[in-house]
Amino acid sequence: MRKFILPGIAVALAFTVLVGLGVWQLIRLDEKQRLISQVATMMKAPPRQLPPQAEWNAPSFAALDFSPVMISGTFRHELEVYLFASVAKGNRGDEQQGLFVLTPFDLADGGSVLVNRGFVPAQLKDPKTRIAGQVEGTVTLTGILKFARTPGLFTPEPDRANRLWFAADPVGMATLQGLTYVAPFMIDADDTPVPGGWPSGGHTVLNFSNNHLQYALTWFGLALVLFVMTLFQLLKSWRPNSGITT
């Protein structure tokens, strides 16, 4: 029996760790689901005035992520840039690939912010194909304030020659266009129609990574495999010798 003590301890520790990791992922799943629910509720709140530029770097400002805000100012359409996008099309769950149009917006009370005006099909990238939507003069709009997310490991580098990004980068986009200061966040315009219909706003996505259930099932699965293999080895070791001696 002594030969089973150390392996048994090792197996018990490994099994405990695997089950513990699975339980931890379930806890993270619950936390993530509650966060997504809270953000979804926050996005439906009445819009508030965007705080002044002096407050943008305050630690408390981060709490406004995914909050509805209202801004007034003027677009700088000649400096628009583009973000690769795929949006739902129709009622069948189909997706249409195209671009989000991001335009610098000079705020009436100082500072600038990139506004994601919404989606256009690839063939409407050229602003000349949607002249009616290039609104001039002072405008007031509402939208969702969003901080940039860290790009994924396999996100392509931006195509600066064509002003095309594959992950939102307000600072990089502003630098390319020669702007000295743009807010470190963007505002996704709501679905209020614009003249001519393009860009089409209201495409804010809750892009929180939420793979915790898959991770939990993986850890529990490994624990089950370890248990079955251990049980098999024990039965094999304790099986009586059925050989016949003469």
Image (spheres, helix red, strand yellow):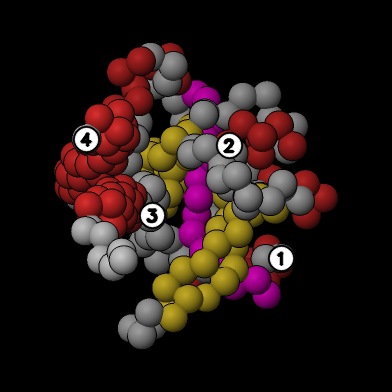
Q: Is residue 56 left or right of residue 161?
A: left
Q: Earlier in the sequence, mark 2 or mark 1?
A: 1
Give the residue type at disc 4.
Met
- Span of residues in magenta: 110-124
The span from disc 3 to disc 4 (Cα, nearest Å) is: 63 Å
Counting from the top left corner in percent of width and height, residue 5 is at 25, 30
Can you tell which of label 3 and label 4 is closer to the viewer? 4
Residue depicted at 46% across the width and 68% down the height: 87
Residue 122 in magenta stretch: yes
Q: Is residue 228 above or below residue 184?
A: below
Can you tell which of label 4 and label 2 is closer to the viewer? 4
The span from disc 2 to disc 1 (Cα, nearest Å) is: 21 Å
Residue depicted at 38% across the width and 39% down the height: 145
Q: Is residue 156 left or right of residue 148?
A: right
Residue located beneath label 2 in the image: 170
Residue located beneath label 1 in the image: 126
Q: Quadrant of the N terminus?
A: top left
Toward which corner of the image does residue 68 lie, by quadrant?
top left
